[in-house]
Amino acid sequence: MTRAYFVSDLHLVSSEDPRTQTFLKFLRSLHAKAQSGTEAPTHLFMVGDVFDLWVGSHEYFVARFREVIEAVRALVRDGVEVHYFEGNHDLHLARYWQNDVGVKVHADAADFELAGKQVRVEHGDLINPDDKGYLFLRKFLRTPAMKTIALELPQAIVRAIGERASRASRDYTSHAKSLPQEQIRALIRSHAQRVGHDFDLIVSGHVHVQDDHEIDLGTRKVRSVNLGSWFDGAKAFVLDDEGARFISI
């Protein structure tokens, strides 16, 4: 039995943030289900921008979100397969989240077989191929030099650089996110058509517009789902053997 949960673009800013408290409630509910065996989760996908800023493995971020970390760690101990996709606000995560917490970290898209379906998961920041400024920034932030900076420099410097990069990323992407929602949905669906015919479902985030649309590619039909953001209310997408749907948290 597969029961996979997908969340994206929570943009948690502190332990006191109401969205953080809601996310904690959600994680603890999954832990309770795993412990009881009733509707137990098998997978949790955190599809980027879970935090408004997280860079590397510095204690500043660990201390700021310790309750969230421990709640995720509890799910890993339960045997839940947890995947974290890097976004444009959370970068260079593997040293801490993968090596310490036990989460599988992905810098780019990845494919899974879930509930009898081929599923592609990605943060979604490659949806707009014409967003040249953001695409350059994305590539620059993932260079070996920037990774070394993120992991090795003192955390006060990394925090300052990270906050500047986060603001730059927000500036670059704010124009795309300010487009009419139907135009954004068209970008989401065009991307699903562009990236290939090897999956039944593609799940993404980033653009802060919830969308659920079936695309006829001729040889097969593909379901394209964008998770939206928690600025518009806390929700998750659930895929299990009975189907797939959004739920409110």
Image (cartoon, rainbow, N blue to C red):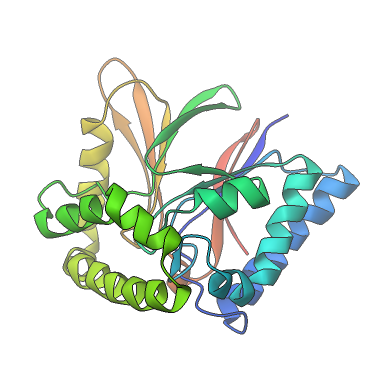
**Quarter that holds the N terminus:** top right
> Is 164 on the left-hand or right-hand side of 204?
left
- Residue 80: percent from left, percent from top: 72, 41
What residue sits 38% from the left and 53% below the top?
Answer: 205
Work out whether 139 lies above or below 164.
above
What residue sits 90% from the left and 47% below the top?
Answer: 36
Quadrant of residue 219 within the rendered picture: top left
Query: 249 and 126: which one is in front?
Result: 126
Query: 47 and 169: which one is in front?
Result: 169
> Is 174 on the left-hand or right-hand side of 204?
left
Work out whether 140 lies above or below 190.
below
Q: Is residue 142 visible?
A: no
> Is 139 on the left-hand or right-hand side of 246?
left
Quadrant of residue 48 within the rendered picture: bottom left
Residue pushed farthest right?
36
- Residue 70: percent from left, percent from top: 73, 62
- Residue 113: percent from left, percent from top: 54, 24
Q: Is residue 247 visible?
A: yes
Query: 72 and 230: which one is in front?
Result: 72
Residue pushed farthest bottom?
16
Query: 34 and 140: which one is in front?
Result: 140
**Quarter that holds the C terminus:** bottom right
Work out whether 49 lies above or below 114.
below
What residue sits 14% from the left and 46% below the top?
Answer: 129
Quadrant of residue 59 within the rendered picture: bottom right
What residue sits 66% from the left and 45% below the top?
Answer: 102
> Is 42 on the left-hand or right-hand side of 10?
right
- Residue 191: percent from left, percent from top: 23, 40
The count of marks equals 0
Residue pushed farthest top?
219
